[in-house]
Structures are given as C-alpha cells and as structure tokens.
Image (spheres, grey):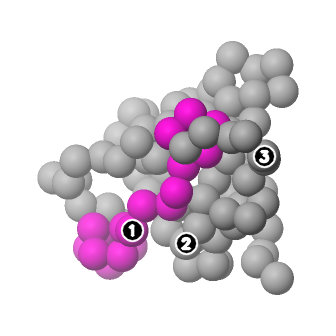
C-alpha cells in the first residue's frame, strides 16, 4: 500500500511536469493533511514559503524505467507529501495547462 502511494505520487508529479506545471501548492482547508494542487510559480499565494506552503516539481525525467519509478532511488520530499495526501484520500484533478 505504501509503495503504491509512492509510485502513484511519482506518476502524478511526472504528469504535472509533462503538462508544463512547475510547482504544487498545499491547500489545507481544514483538513488534517493538506491536499496538493499543481500550479505555476506566478500562481503561488503571496507570502507562501517554499518547503512549507509549496514545493517545486522535482526533475523525475531520469528516475524511472519506462512507466515505473526506480525503486532504489531515494524519494523526494514532493513524493512523500503526495503519497501522504493519497493515503488520506486525495485524488488528482486533471487540469490541462493552457
């Protein structure tokens, strides 16, 4: 279950990056675990803090084998945060960059 969450996080981050997004912001809205939303740097809330309120999308282009993440590679903070949100029931909203 945990490994699946990390794999799903890798796929989501890769998808967001391929769609042209550069960051994701954490939105708590009263939840125990903040849920992520993909965005561009210029869309980040004023006063937000990197590593607390938002994270840049990591470069995962060379970290997989085909459609799967490399299981030996250390996880990024972004993957850990997304996997935690997935475990809490978050599902990505497919939002095309445009």
Given contact means CB atoms under 8 Å apart, are the residues at marks 2 and 1 in contact?
Answer: yes
Q: Which residues are magenta?
A: 51-67
- Left or right: 4, with 18 as reference point: left
- Which of discs 1 and 3 lies nearer the camera? The answer is 3
- Mark 2 and mark 3 lie on one chain; the one further toward the N terminus is 2
Q: CA distance from mark 1 to mark 3?
A: 25 Å
Residue annotated with mark 1 = 59
Q: Is residue 58 magenta?
A: yes
Drawn side of residue 87 relative to residue 61, left or right: right
Q: Which residue is mark 3?
A: 46
Looking at the image, is 57 positioned above or below residue 78?
below
Element assignment for label 1: loop
Earlier along the polypeptide chain: callout 1 or callout 3? 3
Above or below, 71 against 28 in this view is below
Splitting the image into 4 quarters, where does residue 68 fall?
bottom left
**Residue 18: percent from the left, percent from the top?**
56, 79
Spatial CA span between label 2 and label 3: 22 Å
Query: Which of 7/75 is in front?
Result: 75
Q: Position of residue 11 (x, y in %)?
A: 49, 62
Q: Which residue is the site of mark 2?
A: 17
Q: Secondary structure at mark 2?
A: helix
């Amino acid at each position: 279950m945990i490994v699946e969450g990390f794999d799903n996080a890798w796929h989501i981050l890769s998808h967001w990056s391929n769609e042209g997004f550069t960051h994701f912001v954490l939105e708590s809205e009263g939840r125990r675990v903040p849920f992520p939303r993909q965005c561009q740097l210029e869309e980040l809330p004023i006063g937000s803090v990197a590593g607390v309120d938002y994270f840049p999308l990591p470069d995962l282009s060379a970290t997989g084998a085909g459609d799967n993440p490399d299981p030996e590679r250390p996880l990024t903070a972004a993957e850990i945060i997304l996997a935690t949100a997935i475990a809490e029931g978050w599902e990505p909203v497919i939002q095309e960059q445009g």
